Image (cartoon, rainbow, N blue to C red):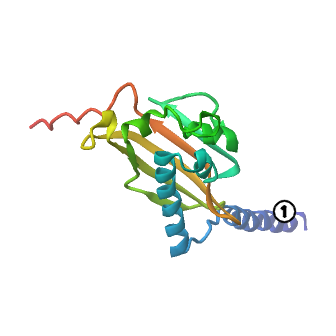
Amino acid sequence: MTRTFIAVLTFAVFVTLPGTALAQQKVMQLTAMDYIEIQQLVAKYARFIDTCSNNGYDYADLYTADGIFLPVTDGKPAGKGIQGRERLAEVSGGGSRGCKNVGWIQQGVRHLYPNHIIEATPEGAKGTVDMLMIGLGGDPNKIQYDGHYEDIYVKTPQGWRFKQRTHHALLSGGRPAAPAPASK
């Protein structure tokens, strides 16, 4: 009788655990509209940071109330991140900075975010997107790659928002080195 009980208990644990793990890993089903809305979130990010619209608060409102922007420069975190509506507005040039003396705006820089990949997660979605800047130094024809973003998106009553946006910038090294030619 003891062997039968142990065998049944072992079988029950074996059958239950995989089902529990699968339930925890189930990803959200994203609709076509979800993908469009997330792409629009990233497009608004570019427009709002380039124009300092609404004194930077349009940019800040793209994040959840507890959302965070994490700058990483050349692989090293640059501080603990920026969190909170006021601090996010300031990082975009607005808030207490008043959209004055914002270098990229004065130069006429425009941000572009190509190669956007979005994947469903249990909490919402995650994404990666490259960052290009046009107009550095006032030259409207100059385009520079400045790393990429890794994002965590969540759907809120106000629509999709950034829960976390990590910018992996390449400031000291500039553009990545070209690959070495293949040897024959």
Q: Is residue 18 left or right of residue 116?
A: right
Which is nearer the eye, 109 or 112?
Answer: 109
Q: Identify whether 141 is placed above or below 152.
A: above
Q: What is the quadrant of the N terminus in the image?
A: bottom right
Element class at badge 1: helix
Q: Residue at x 56, y 46 (%)?
A: 165
Q: Percent from the top left, x then y, of residue 89? A: 62, 42
Q: Residue at x 43, y 44 (%)?
A: 148
Residue nearer the viewer, 14 or 81: 81
Image quadrant of residue 19?
Answer: bottom right
The residue that label 1 is drawn on is 6
Could you classify mark 1 by the number of other residues whose Cα lies within 10 Å: few (under 14), some (14-19), or many (20 or more)?
few
Specify the farthest residue to the bottom: 32
Q: Residue at x 59, y 50 (%)?
A: 54
Q: Quadrant of residue 181?
A: top left
Q: Is residue 53 above or below residue 33?
A: above
* View extreme (left): residue: 184
Instruction: Give the residue type that dot 1 points to.
Output: Ile
Q: Quadrant of the C terminus?
A: top left
Q: Position of residue 132 (x, y in %)?
A: 36, 45
Residue 17 spot, x, y in % from top left: 74, 62
Drawn side of residue 138 relative to residue 60, left or right? left
Q: Residue at x 46, y 51 (%)?
A: 46
Residue located farthest toward the right when viewing the structure as drawn: 1
Which quadrant of the figure has residue 4?
bottom right
Q: Is residue 106 above or below residue 153?
A: above
Query: With respect to residue 17, does 90 lie above or below?
Result: above
Q: Position of residue 24 (x, y in %)?
A: 70, 62
